DNA sequence: CTCTGGATTAGCT
DNA sequence: GCTAATCCAGAGC
């Protein structure tokens, strides 16, 4: 069980997105409670050259975290309801990130159910907005370092491997030729479209 | 300053 | 399948 450090995140978002599938996401709440899940679906977003990326039009107040150091969180709010969790990749200023789209909950299910007001495990973390609600993630966590053991969000490698498939990203109109969505084949917690 | 639409979801038809 | 819910960054004036 090793924590993923800055060198892991300092590579291309496509590589990081593919390798994050199967890793364990750990969220530590204010009261010390641990919520955990296996990452089963991710998407890579580039910087200035990726028209689908928030960073495409340059830095702004909203996307500033993407331009920071690798291994930090980029959390944004969309559709007036939902938060999405991303991990910043590459070097500072290169603005790329990996969106966490779904996880398979493994620990703290009861608390997740309360946060989501849903009882079935498959209603908890099977989408980017749902996962943030289940793990109590909002913009207060934007920009935090995720490479430390004591970080309220961090990722562990427990050696598990999955068969992975790649497809175009969901909800994106342009750049459909880039198959930058990765997910664990056959996993029940991959978001379904 | 105002307007538009989105890296979504739930609930109803 | 369709659409309402509802915030805010970015674009255009």
Image: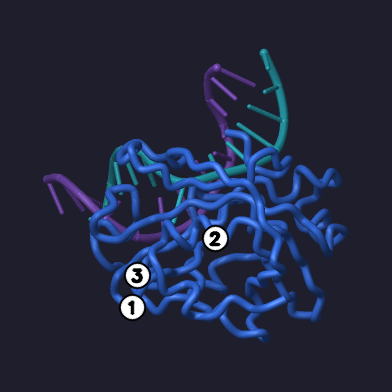
Chain colours: A blue, B cyan, C purple
Towards the viewer: A145 or A115: A145
Q: Is A37 on the left or on the right of A91, as rendered? A: right
Position of the C terminus of chain A, as image quadrant, is top right
> Which chain is disc 3 placed on?
A
The image quarter containing residue A70 is bottom left
Element assignment for label 1? loop
Q: Residues within 10 Å of mark 3 (few under 14, many from 20)?
A: few
Q: Residue A149 placed where, x, y %?
A: 66, 84
> Which chain is disc 2 placed on?
A
Label 2 sits on residue? A19
Residue at image coords 69%, 66%: A159
Label 1 sits on residue? A92
Camera-side mark, 3 or 2: 2
Labels 3, 1: one chain: yes
Residue at image coords 65%, 43%: A190
Element assignment for label 3? loop
Label 3 sits on residue? A61
The image quarter containing residue C9 is bottom left
């Amino acid at each position: 069980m090793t924590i993923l450090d800055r060198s892991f995140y300092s590579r291309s978002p496509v590589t990081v997105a593919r390798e994050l599938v199967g890793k364990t996401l750990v969220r530590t709440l204010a009261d010390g409670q641990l919520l955990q899940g296996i990452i089963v679906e991710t998407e890579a977003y580039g910087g200035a050259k990726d028209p689908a990326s928030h960073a495409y039009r340059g830095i702004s107040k909203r996307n500033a975290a993407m331009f920071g150091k690798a291994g930090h969180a980029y959390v944004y709010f969309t559709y007036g309801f939902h938060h999405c969790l991303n991990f910043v990749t590459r070097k500072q200023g290169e603005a790329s990130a990996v969106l966490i789209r779904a996880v398979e909950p493994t620990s703290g299910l009861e608390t997740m159910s309360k946060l989501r007001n849903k009882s079935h495990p498959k209603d908890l973390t099977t989408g980017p907005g749902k996962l943030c609600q289940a793990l109590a993630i909002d913009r207060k966590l934007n920009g935090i370092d995720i490479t430390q053991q004591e970080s309220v969000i961090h990722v562990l490698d427990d050696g598990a491997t999955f068969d992975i498939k790649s497809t175009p990203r969901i909800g994106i109109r342009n750049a459909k030729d880039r198959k930058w969505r990765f997910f664990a084949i056959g996993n029940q917690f991959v978001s379904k479209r």
